[in-house]
Structures are given as C-alpha cells and as structure tokens.
Image (cartoon, helix red, strand yellow):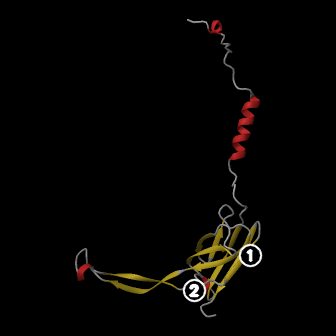
Amino acid sequence: MTNLRSFGVVTRPHRAASPAVILLAGVGLLAGCGRNSGPERAMVRGQVTFDGAPIEQGTIVLLPANSKGPSSGGPIQKGEFLLPAESGPVPGDYRVEIRATKQEGTVTVAGVAGATTGPSAGSTEPKIVMFIPDRYNTKSELTAKVAPGQNELTFPLKSKP
C-alpha cells in the first residue's frame, strides 16, 4: 500500500460535518422552499345569483382591468365561489366574467351518411345553452376591486337590464 504522505498529500480522518454547516445548509434550503416568488395574491370568495336564484354550476374569471398582471378564476358551485390566496388575483381592479350553462331540451345529431341504425346512426343529445347574458361574460360590464387579504364579492345578475 502506498503512503500518500510521501506524495505530499495530506489526509485527514473522516469527520462528521459540523453542526453549524448542517444548520446553514438547512436554513438555505428552507429559505428557498414554500415561498411564491410572484406578486402577492388575495383570497376572494363570494356569491353569484341569476334572477335571485343561486347559479348551480358555472365559472367566474377576474381579468385585470389594465390588461397587466395575471387573471384568476374558478368554479361556481351552488351560487358560491372561492379563489384561494395561492392562486387568487393580485390586488387591483378587475373586469369580471361569469359563465353558466343549462340543458334546454334536446338536439338530434345526424348519422354518418344518413345512417339510421348501427354505430354510425344519429342520436339525440342534450342541448346545452349559455343562459347568462353577454353583458356578464364576453361583453362583461361587471367590475371588482380586490384588496390585499380576504375579499367578499356578490354578483346579483339579472336576465333583463
């Protein structure tokens, strides 16, 4: 076996890392974990009704009024929505779009090449329609101001202006 000291190599016995080194490494790892490096976001919850009745299912989207910054949105269930702070909007002014659909009868879907039987035959499907007027979604007139922290918004939508 060769003696490493004869080649000018100084060896040291294996030692455990000092507690200070371990502590600094742990603090460095924790400092980089669990923090969102983006802008501060706010929690928004609220209610949405249409002609006085809660919207059973739909979506709400908050779009920045100045077209800068992230949009935020989520589902509406039984007239209520919740946008948690982790994915909610940043404080500021927003244009709000609300969408909801409902089944309104059925529609007949034609079969392939006029087939009336077999796998290529036509069928009857539910007709799904958007029942929220454009002034609340694609041409929305709704606005909201979101403050830091927790926010409560209410949108009483009406079928007629």
The quarter of the image holding the N terminus is top right
How packed mark 2 is, by other alpha carbons closer than 10 Å (few <14, some 14-19, many 20 or more), is: some
Residue 4 x/y as whole percent: 62, 9
Residue highlighted by disc 1: 145
How packed mark 1 is, by other alpha carbons closer than 10 Å (few <14, some 14-19, many 20 or more), is: few
Q: Residue furthest front?
A: 7
Sooner in the amino-acid sequence: mark 2 or mark 1: 2
Q: Amino acid at mark 1?
A: Lys
| Nearer the observer, 37 or 99 | 37
Residue 155 x/y as whole percent: 67, 82
Q: Amino acid at mark 2?
A: Asp
Q: Quadrant of residue 65?
A: bottom right
Q: Residue at x 57, y 86 (%)?
A: 134
Q: Residue at x 69, y 20 (%)?
A: 15
* 3 over 41 or under it: above or below: above
Q: Quadrant of residue 36?
A: bottom right
Query: From the viewer's perspective, is 144 left or right of 137?
Result: right
Residue 137 x/y as whole percent: 59, 81
* 9 over 148 or under it: above or below: above
Question: What is the CA distance from the residue labelled 2 to the residue labelled 1?
Answer: 21 Å
Residue 122, which numbered label? none
Q: Secondary structure at mark 1?
A: strand
Residue highlighted by disc 2: 134
Q: Secondary structure at mark 2?
A: helix
Q: Quadrant of residue 100?
A: bottom right
